[in-house]
Image (cartoon, coloured by chain):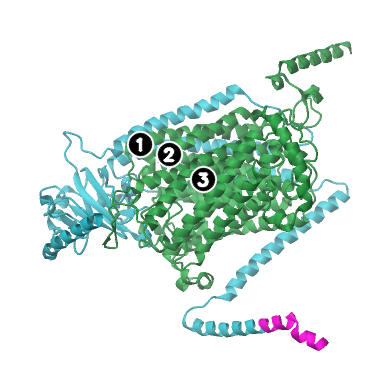
Chain colours: A green, B cyan
Amino acid sequence: MSTLAVHDHGVAHHEEGHEHHHKDTFLTKYIFSQDHKMIAKQFLITGITMAFIAMILSVLFRIQLAYPDRAFPLLETLLGRFAPEGRLDPEFYLSLVTIHGTIMVFFVLTAGLSGTFSNLLIPLQVGARDMASPFMNMLSYWFFFTACVIMLSSFFIQKGPAGPGWTIYPPLSALPTAMKGSGMGMTLWLISMVCFIASSLMGGINYVSTVLNMRTKGMDLWKMPLTIWAFFLTAILGVLSFPVLVAGVVLLIFDRSFGTSFYLSDIVVQGQVMPFEGGSPILFQHLFWFLGHPEVYIVIMPAMGISSEVMSVNSRKPIFGYHAMVYSLIGITVLSFIVWGHHMFVTGMNPFLGGVFMITTLIIAVPSAVKTFNWLATIWRGNIRFTPAMLFAIGMVSFFISGGLTGIFLGNAALDINLHDTYFVVAHFHLVMGSAAIFGMLAGVYHWFPKMFGRMMDDKLGYLHFWLTFIGAYLVFFPMHFMGLDGVPRRYYQFTEFVSMQRWLSVNMFITWAAIISALAQVAFLYNFIHSMFWGKKTVQNPWQANTLEWTAPIEHFHGNWHGEIPSVYRWPYDYSKPGAEEDYIMQTTPLSQTMSSNVPHDFEDNPAGLEELSKWTNTQKANEEVK
Amino acid sequence: MGFNKVITSKKMLSLFAVLMLTGTNLLMAQGTATAAAEKPGVDWLSVSYYILLFVLACIAIAVIGKILKVYDLSQKIQGKAGINWNNLMAIICIVFLIAGAVGTYWSFSVQGKMLLPDAASVHGVKIDSMFWTTTVITFIVFVVTQILLFTFLFVYKHSSKRRAYFLPHNNTIEKVWTIIPAIVLTVLVIFGFFTWQEVTNSADAKGQPASINVDITGKQFQWDLRYPGPDGLLGKKNYKLVGGANKMGIDYTDKNSMDDLAADTLVIPVNKSVRLNIFALDVIHSVYMPHFRVQLNAVPGLPTYFKFTPTLTTQEMRNKLDDPKFEYLVYCNKICGASHYNMQKIVRVVSEAEYTQWLAKQQPLLTPALRTELKLAEVKNNNISTNRLALNN
């Protein structure tokens, strides 16, 4: 029923689209665009810009960690009062850490990743002319843009940006007298985050409704590519968890600005007794991590979806265990709501609760393990083409394994006692969610660049970019595990005050140089991206010989995606290297009736008539052969 | 006319602006030059050197890229196959695997030796054994999966002669690799759950000798300690009483408070159960004593407790590590402000005899100065409470 309705809608929209097409001005085409493809590009370019900013911030604090005793007058020239005498101010160091984390987690890996690829691929892969609500989609981008501007503007105020870590635990974030970074910078952080969440929600609602209501004819849920499944479940996760963060943030704003005591009690700051009573700092942690944990899956699930798709296309092999892949995504989605407490094992939360959260946390490792094994099985006996996208997808899997396994340590409450907030944690999440997710995103950029810009990126530069970044990321994060196991805490301005930590200085120097080199490697990407956008080789219709619907849409962009009727879908998206088929891929739009030689009984599971056809056809084939 | 046009044109205006700007820049530069004489200025020479280095690297890469392209083309013109990038990537994958294995081995053998020594507490030993079990299991999975990943990449690299094996699913093997991780994780969960329950039980059981209670209070950026006096009991505290010499807000209307002792170092007797009562005054801190596998946040408004039994004295640990300067430490492990990176206190584990000796030497928190101050404070206190009442009304 729904497909019928969608079909009608599509036609109506299409005519409308044509009208628009003639009236497009620069403003409506590039700035206040309501076309999902343009909005995707806006998200991508803003995301990349933010990623570069956050990366530069990380290089700055890495320099501090490697050379705690050395002055760099250049820093003073660049940063002014934030680096007096050429050395970073300790409070500014904390601000750098905070803003690096915030930008990377929210602005790059949530908005930059989901925003880009959900917008680009959902309509194109399910066969819709645009999002369910293009106007809301546009608002979503502009709220995101506003959030970015507000966040960055905090670098230009007297006391500098927010500094209490990206988790902004009160009371530190609630008491402007406790640190500089809890002043005006914190206020801007909170405002920015409210805008960001509004953006995320508008995006998420759009993604969910588009996937549910606007699929083309024949595209039932079990024919959707894994990318769409991932984006769909990610959006659900976001829609359900982000409002909780808004609640948490708004209450914090109340505590900061209107004298309430939701999170504050029994506080004496610098000898001054504060009037707050009856609140609980732990309450904020609950609210924060109720979003915060699903957030890490919001970050990684799109990367998983993209990698699954890219690996299947480039291995020329169906994704192994499509159903298991979907069910494990669903499992992760559901479980991610009941594991938030593993961030709070040692915060003073009731220890019994800690035990319960430990159980749920370790259960979530099962669907993650299933996904990993399925990826391995996908490349097994494949026919692997190493496009840059494929390499990044592989990198994603490698990081996901390395970082995921250390999660088993941290998810275990008893082990977490000694590992909590050490560099072991830093290593863990930078591998499993930072590097893995960014690699998923880069795989997506390389893979769908032709779809976005109608041109190809340069492969060789892509290879260079991949290997430098891949090796660099391992060199940066692998040694950090050992630092954590020696009890070196994160968010320390320098390690010179502790005799036991001084011996890690050489390792810190090594990490910093690895970080600088991998940061410079990103120049290869930036050059490749911008150069290919304007002067890259023109793409062909289906450059990767992929099955999914987006490659049937014309290369040239226009609002509405397809001329004429939207193509119908007849099969699942992973018919690669099917025995008996002419080519090693069969597009979703190819009816089963055209591929009699490659059909298998499994294709007709819910279709007895089709099965009968197949057996008739096989019988005649057999009969023919016997005659011969 | 033409001349006129030139004078009024925007070009002249912008030229003027440029001149002005360069002029001010020159002046500014002179200003900074004089400032530079006082303190070390930016070493622009080395800055430009590094930039030049990077530009050179970029040019080198561009040149290599061009050479490869030309080589590729010339090969193709001669009818030979050009560089097979696909095979090259597959080879790099296997090289990466080998280099990665060597690197991991090196890392484990060099940095793996820099880890914390074995736990110096009773519960820490259990945590350690669980840690090593988990390490062995995860390390095996890590090695096997990474080897499979990169070997598959190498072995199944593209060839136009064959097709990939069409294998959409296999329910048996999927069940196997769902159930095996589930079983392994269940074992770890059960193991971990009971250890956790045991470790976090901070109350003294009946019949057990009572633990030594020590208060540790975190504030920006130091730890304050309070030991019970001869009565073995710690008195009440109230944050509203913080002020003047009463840094911890001890309530001296409680008799138990009178003999409570101040201390600079967290001295604890070996093989005795110690219960830390953890408080924070301003923001969240975290009591972190990695050698004892102890960590718990100090939360304002929410007292927390950690009970542990140290098993090695400082001296024994010094001998074991062959480091005469070794000290156990407690340090802050939750971001708490500018000096978060230096909020430490020495912990010294001693024999019981030494402990009693040391405790006898400690001064009470209720100093004569505080005594006189307190008389005043009591009056002040009343004022405060009436004020508050008025406010509440």
| Mark 2 surroundings: few (<14), some (14-19) or many (≥20) residues within 10 A | many
| Mark 3 surroundings: few (<14), some (14-19) or many (≥20) residues within 10 A | few
User: Magenta stretch: residue B10 in it?
Assistant: yes
Q: Mark 2 lies on which chain?
A: A
Of the residues under marks 1 and 2, which one precedes in the sequence?
Answer: 1
Q: Mark 3 points at which residue?
A: B105
| Circle 3: residue type | Tyr
Q: Is the magenta stretch mostly helix, strand or loop?
A: helix
Quarter of the picture holding the N terminus of chain A? top right
| Circle 2: residue type | Gly
Secondary structure, mark 1, is helix
Residue range of the region highlighted in magenta in the rendering? B1-18
The correct choice, above or below, for A434 with respect to B48 in the image is above
Question: Residue B273, position in %: x, y?
Answer: 21, 42
Question: Residue B181, position in %: x, y?
Answer: 49, 30
User: Magenta stretch: residue A512 in it?
Assistant: no
Q: Name the residue under label 1.
A: A353
Please name whichever residue, B307 or A272, is drawn nearer the observer in this view of the structure.
Answer: A272
Q: Name the residue under label 2.
A: A411
Question: Residue A28, position in %: x, y?
Answer: 71, 54
Q: CB of mark 3 within 8 Å of CB of mark 2?
A: no
Q: Which chain carries label 3?
A: B
Quarter of the picture holding the C terminus of chain A? top right
Give the CA separation, mark 1 to mark 2.
13 Å
Residue A346 falls in which quadrant of the image?
A: top left
